[in-house]
Image (cartoon, rainbow, N blue to C red):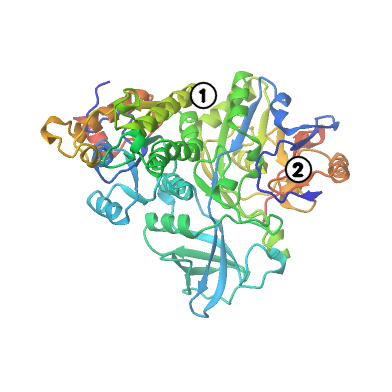
């Protein structure tokens, strides 16, 4: 596939590869995705806005440059919000260098202070079992921290997009609470016209909020642990809409892997989604039984990534390999600003296996 | 529904998350105070750091944000702070205004730059900020909390007053844009209001009409109360459990 290197959320020539429940594959202009939906469907998207989660600064003890990429928060409950984040750190340089080629951050110890631009500073509160992974606490009041993030933070980005991203490049049209560390980019497909189009066709629309984490750290060992735990919130209205749709035999269509992860995490054994706050810590993949989601609209993902592995919950490996071959042969674009796939759950995924939980 | 500043847990303003631009003086400051008294969670925006700090110090419940809605580069940082600090948004009040040339001038004498500032502050700013916060507003609507955008208008948006050209034309554009937003997003549950608070004793009015007798002008507190009542009217009455009433309003309800 070709890396999409321009920050255009809805290019007019965006393509959508469709794999239906019988494994049949077709291709449509992505702008027509609403036509693939049925009046009884419930479409659910992730409405998280994206934080400017990349911060450049100085490690005061060594005087060395450091880049901090915020990567996790323990809860989305506002009263639980603390200016403390799990974060991945890099040494000198920026997104123009591939993450794989970035130097390690200076050696960090608990209590070390980082100056992250202007008055924004933070303390290393703890280390994990990997030199790139830390727990970071910002100094100052909540309002000061938000002002500092707004002023000094940049969206996390990767070398395949050469121009620096602004927040407006990564906020989806429905971006609400800024809790995501990277854009829930499948949602780029939506605009207000398609939301109106769904309503006119009596297709229901609802949202969840999931703090989408990093898609890559540049470190093979850390990448194997992706996705990190992701805090989410399911509104009461969304839980009710799922109940209604299921009762009427309609389909739940997830926009993006993050929605699948949140809904399946919040599902009880008998397929009821509970409203409220949670932390998705499971891995969805081959053998996961999908209790809630019937179809997914997602970006095109490269084999081996955690997003790609999630698609294996929807269809068998042979069909997925067939879809991959088409994406490759016909020059689909990949990464966050790339083309998309729409996959209806195949029969195989009805197999009664338990989801594999990450250690 | 009658609306007054005392807490009432049937009042949709109580517990609502509200952002006010131009919140450190005049009508904006009066709105911040009235909303706080009603139990709203309030963030306010203004250009001057010292003014923002001063208002935040006097009103510890309100969250001050420094930014200029007329500057494109400031919009997303402002939206980020509003939605981040409040955890979403139910009500946006685009109140910040620019008069255009001061002293007022005939259109033939109005510097193009002054007209541009009026448009940037009174039309483009509200458009951009609304667009950046549309996701938060839509989420509130879907969750049954309701959502309202109030764009502060003026009778100069309707009447062709000589010497009010830049201001009047920009406010007319804002008013028309508000009506189109309302047509387009009513179906998603987001309401848009354009309201004229009347001639008030504010710094903007003093700039426009320096020798006006303040005694003949409306007090901004009165206008603020009327606007907050209109917002309350446009929001759905809180359904059981949709919003957690504050302790103060529970106290009020027991009396």
Q: Is residue B25 above or below residue A28?
A: below
Residue A292: tell me if it is visible: no
Category of crowding for the residue at label 2, using alpha-carbon neighbours closer than 10 angstroms: few (below 14), some (14–19), many (at least 20): many
Category of crowding for the residue at label 1, using alpha-carbon neighbours closer than 10 angstroms: few (below 14), some (14–19), many (at least 20): some
Residue at screen point 52% across, 79% down: A63
Q: Confirm whether circles 2 and 1 share one chain.
A: no
Subunit that carries the residue with mark 1 = B
User: Residue furthest toward the bottom?
Assistant: A62
Q: Depth check: give the residue in front, A266 or A258.
A: A258
Residue A226: x %, y % from top left: 67, 56
Residue B192: x %, y % from top left: 41, 27
Quarter of the figure with the C terminus of chain B: top left
Residue B184: tell me if it is visible: yes
Whole-angstrom CA distance, mark 2 to mark 1, is 36 Å
Quarter of the figure with the N terminus of chain B: top left
Residue B225: x %, y % from top left: 23, 31
Subunit that carries the residue with mark 2 = A
**Secondary structure beneath disc 2?**
helix
Q: Depth check: give the residue in front, B161 or A110.
A: B161
Mark 2 and mark 1 residues within 8 Å of each other at the beta carbon: no
Please state the total of marks drawn on the protein image: 2
Please state if A251 lies on the left or on the right of A79 as rendered.
right
Residue at screen point 57% across, 54% down: A155
Question: Which residue, given by chain and number where applicable, does mark 2 sit on?
Answer: A311
Question: Which residue, given by chain and number where applicable, does mark 1 sit on?
Answer: B184
Q: Is residue B178 above or below residue A72?
A: above
Q: Depth check: give the residue in front, A351 or B84.
A: B84
**Image quarter of residue A198:** top right
Residue A255: x %, y % from top left: 66, 37
């Amino acid at each position: 596939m070709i890396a999409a290197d321009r920050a255009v959320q809805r290019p007019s020539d965006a393509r959508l590869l469709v794999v239906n429940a019988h494994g049949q594959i077709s291709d449509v202009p992505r702008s027509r995705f609403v036509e693939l939906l049925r009046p009884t469907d419930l479409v659910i998207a992730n409405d998280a806005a994206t934080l400017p989660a990349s911060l450049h600064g100085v490690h005061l003890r060594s005087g060395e440059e450091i880049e901090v990429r915020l990567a996790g928060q323990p809860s989305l409950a506002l009263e639980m919000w603390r200016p403390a984040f799990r974060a991945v750190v890099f040494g000198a340089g920026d997104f123009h260098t591939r993450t794989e080629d970035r130097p390690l951050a200076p050696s960090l110890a608990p209590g070390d202070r980082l100056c992250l631009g202007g008055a924004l500073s933070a303390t290393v509160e703890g280390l994990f079992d990997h030199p790139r992974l830390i727990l970071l606490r910002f100094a100052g009041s909540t309002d000061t921290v938000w002002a500092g993030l707004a002023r000094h933070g940049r969206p996390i980005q990767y070398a395949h997009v050469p121009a620096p991203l602004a927040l407006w490049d990564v906020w989806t049209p429905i971006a609400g609470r800024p809790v995501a560390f990277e854009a829930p980019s499948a949602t780029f497909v939506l605009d207000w016209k398609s939301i109106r189009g769904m309503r006119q066709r009596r297709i229901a629309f609802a949202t969840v909020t999931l703090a989408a984490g990093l898609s890559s750290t540049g470190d093979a060992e850390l990448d194997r642990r992706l996705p990190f735990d992701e805090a989410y919130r399911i509104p009461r209205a969304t839980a009710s809409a799922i109940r209604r749709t299921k009762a009427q035999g309609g389909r739940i269509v997830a926009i993006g892997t993050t929605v699948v992860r949140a809904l399946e995490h919040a599902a009880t054994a008998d397929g009821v989604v509970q409203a409220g706050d949670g932390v998705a810590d499971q891995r969805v993949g081959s053998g996961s039984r999908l209790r809630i989601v019937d179809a997914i609209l997602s970006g095109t993902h490269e084999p081996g990534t955690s997003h790609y592995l999630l698609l294996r919950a929807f269809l068998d490996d042979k069909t997925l390999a067939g879809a991959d071959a088409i994406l490759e042969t016909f020059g689909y674009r990949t990464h966050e600003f790339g083309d998309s796939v729409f996959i209806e759950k195949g029969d195989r995924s009805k197999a009664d296996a338990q989801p594999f939980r990450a250690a | 529904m009658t609306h007054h500043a005392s807490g009432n847990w049937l009042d949709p303003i109580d517990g609502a998350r509200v952002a006010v631009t131009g919140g450190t003086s005049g009508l904006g400051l009066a709105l911040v105070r009235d909303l706080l008294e009603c139990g709203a969670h309030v963030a306010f925006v203004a250009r001057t750091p010292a003014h923002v700090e001063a208002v935040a110090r006097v009103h510890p419940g309100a969250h001050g944000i420094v930014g200029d809605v007329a500057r494109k580069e400031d919009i997303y940082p402002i939206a980020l702070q509003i939605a981040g600090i409040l955890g979403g948004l139910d009500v946006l009040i685009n109140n910040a205004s620019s008069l255009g040339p001061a002293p007022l001038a005939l259109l033939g004498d109005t510097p193009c730059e002054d007209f541009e500032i009026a448009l940037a502050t009174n039309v483009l700013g509200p458009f951009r900020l609304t667009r950046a916060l549309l996701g938060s507003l839509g989420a509130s609507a879907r969750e049954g909390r309701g959502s309202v955008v109030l764009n502060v208008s003026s009778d100069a948006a309707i009447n062709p007053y000589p010497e009010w050209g830049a201001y009047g034309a920009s406010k007319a554009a804002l008013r028309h844009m508000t009506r189109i937003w309302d047509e387009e997003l009513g179906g998603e549950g987001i309401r848009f209001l354009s309201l004229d608070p009347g001639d008030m004793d504010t710094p903007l009015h003093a700039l426009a009409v320096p020798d006006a007798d303040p005694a003949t002008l409306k007090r901004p507190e009165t206008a603020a109360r009327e606007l907050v009542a209109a917002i309350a009217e446009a929001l759905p009455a809180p359904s059981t459990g949709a919003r957690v009433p504050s302790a103060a309003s529970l106290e009020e309800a027991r009396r």
